[in-house]
Image (tube, rainbow, N blue to C red):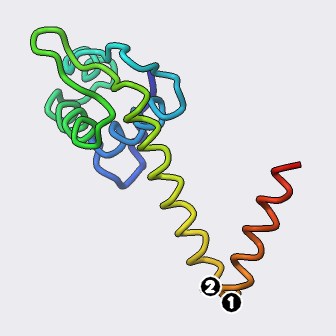
Amino acid sequence: MFVIDYRDKRPLNEQVTDKLQTLILAGALPAESRLPSVRELAMQLSINPNTVQRAYSELERRGLIYPVKGKGNFVSGSAGIAERKQQEARHALVSALEACLSAGLTRQEALETADAWAKEEER
């Protein structure tokens, strides 16, 4: 499925959460598909099952997966995923605007740049 980077300073459960989130948002794990069980994924990644369970709990909190008692965890429907993609896009846009302002662009210059890009995309 994916590989854990042991040189990454982030906790393993964060890495698992981020990698699964990326796969879900990219569509590599389609809506309503079943995720590997906690034990299966822990064995594949050679990590503790509690680490995988923490990652699954975080993904559930974010609305990307949901549990079904006795059946496992499943990827949420496309409405929740689309909302999450939009939320992340807004966050990325805010970060980009903050970078523009810290680089010395005025608010107006940043907005003009965004507007010019939008006009180019319409063509």
Q: Quadrant of the N terminus?
A: top left
Whole-Å distance between the Cαs marked 2 and 1?
6 Å
In the displayed orientation, state which residue is furthest to the left: 69
- For numbered disc 1, what is the local secondary structure? loop
**How many marks can you see?**
2
Which residue does the image show at 18% across and 38% down from the upper left? 54
- Could you say where residue 31 lies in the image, as x and y percent from the top left? 41, 20
| Crowding near the residue tagged with mark 2, few <14, some 14–19, many ≥20 C-alpha atoms within 10 Å | some
Which residue does the image show at 39% across and 42% down from the upper left? 18
Residue 103 vs 28, above or below: the answer is below
- The amino acid type of the residue labelled 2 equals Leu
Q: Is residue 79 left or right of residue 113?
A: left
Residue 6 vs 113, above or below: the answer is above
In the displayed orientation, state which residue is furthest to the right: 123
- Could you say where residue 112 lies in the image, as x and y percent from the top left? 76, 76
Q: Is residue 23 left or right of residue 74?
A: right
Which residue does the image show at 23% across and 41% down from the upper left? 58
- The amino acid type of the residue labelled 1 equals Thr
Corner quadrant of residue 65: top left
- Could you say where residue 102 lies in the image, as x and y percent from the top left? 60, 86
Circle on res. 42 = none
Q: Is residue 97 left or right of residue 19?
A: right
| Crowding near the residue tagged with mark 1, few <14, some 14–19, many ≥20 C-alpha atoms within 10 Å | few
Earlier sequence position, callout 2 versus callout 1: 2
Residue identified by numbered label 2: 101
- For numbered disc 2, what is the local secondary structure? helix
- Could you say where residue 90 lies in the image, as x and y percent from the top left? 51, 59
Residue 36 vs 18, above or below: the answer is above
Residue identified by numbered label 1: 106
Q: Badges 2 and 1: C-beta atoms under 8 Å apart?
A: yes
